[in-house]
Image (cartoon, rainbow, N blue to C red):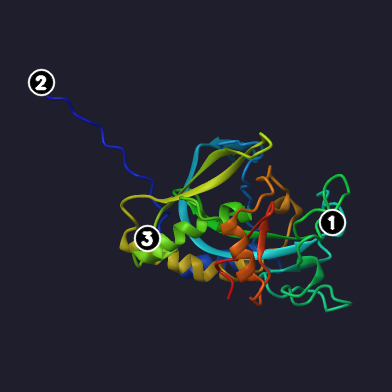
Amino acid sequence: KSKEVAKVASPQLPAIPDPKELKEIFDSNFEGITPSFEIIKIPTGGGTFWTVPTEEGEEDSQKELVGVILDHYTVRAYWPGVFSGGNSPPACSSLNGRQGNQPRTDGEFGDCATCKWAQFGTATKPDGNSGRGQACKLKHRVFLLPIGQSIFPYLIPLSVMSATKKYDGSFSTYTVKLAGKLKKLREVKSRIKLTKDTNADGQEYSKAQFSEVPGGLTGEEKKMTAFLSEQLKSAMKSRPFETEEFDEEVKEPETRGPEQREVDREERTGSAPAVEEDGERVKDPWEK
C-alpha cells in the first residue's frame, strides 16, 4: 500500500497590493507622521532565539527569521557620558554614518570622520571609566520584510560584529556571496539565525548568521519587493532614532592580532573612521 506524503507549501509573500489602494491607506493612516518599524534585536547573553513582536502586542520566540531584505545602511548616534538608555534623544546622530545632524563646534559633531566622538578611546564604560571604543555608537540597520505576515518590514539593528566581521554568515560576507552570484538582496529570501560564541572572559554573546533560502522569489514576488522597497524607501531612510536599538549586547574580548594591526595601519590612511567592536577595528564595507 503506497503512502502519501503531505506537501507543505513554503511561506509566500503577501499579494502585490494595488498601488492606488496602498497610496490611499498611506495617505489616510500616515498623514503628518512617518511610518515606524518594529525592532527585533539581537539578544543578550548568547541567546539563540529571536524575540518577535506580535499583532496582539505580545512577544513570540523564533529560532530563525525568514524574509526579504528591502534596505540596509549604517547609522551613528552619540549620547554624552555613560549610555543608560531611556527616551533621551542623542546629542548628535547621523542617518548615513558620515554626516552628523549637528553643526561643527570645537571639533565635535558635523563630519563623522573627524568628529572627536568618533575617535577611538572616547567611549565611556558603564563604571564611568574610559573605554577603547568610540563614544559615538554605530549600528547597521537591516529592514527585513517577514514572509507571509505584513507589507511592513522589521528593523534589525546589527552590531558591528554581526554586520562587518568576516565570519561565515556575517552580513557583509552574505552580501558579498550574493553579489558574486549576481543576486540582489531584495530578490532573494534570507534566513537569519543566531549563533552563540564565548569571549576570552567566558562571557557568552550572540551573533547573527545570514543565509539564502533555496528557491528564491517568483517573478511576481520580485515585482512586489521592488514596489514595496520604492514605496517605503523614504520611511526606512528617515526612521527616527530610538535608544532601544543602541542597547548593547555582551561583547567580544578587546584583542588585536597581527592581521588586525595591519588593518589598523591601512585605516589610518583612509578618510573615514574605522569601526570598532571591542577592540577590533574593521572598515564599514558600505562606506561610500
Q: Quadrant of residue 263?
A: bottom right
Indicate which disc residue 1 carries: 2
Q: Is residue 187 above or below residue 50?
A: below
Please provide percent x and percent y for residue 261: 62, 61
Image quadrant containing the C terminus: bottom right
Label 1 sits on residue? 88
At label 1, the amino acid type is Ser
Label 3 sits on residue? 221
Q: Is residue 248 above or below residue 70?
A: above
Tell me, yes or no, whether the two marked residues, 2 and 1, touch with CB atoms within 8 Å.
Answer: no
Residues 252 and 247: in front is 252
Please provide percent x and percent y for residue 44: 66, 39
Kindly report which numbered mark, 3 or 1, lies closer to the viewer in this rendering.
Answer: 1
Q: CA distance from mark 2 to mark 1?
A: 68 Å
Instruction: Please tell me which of labels 2 and 1 falls first in the chain.
Output: 2
At label 2, the amino acid type is Lys
Residues 78 and 116: in front is 116
Describe the element under mark 3 as helix, strand or loop.
Answer: helix
Describe the element under mark 2 as helix, strand or loop.
Answer: loop
Residues 235 and 210: in front is 210
At 82% from the left edge and 52% from the top edge, which residue is drawn?
A: 83
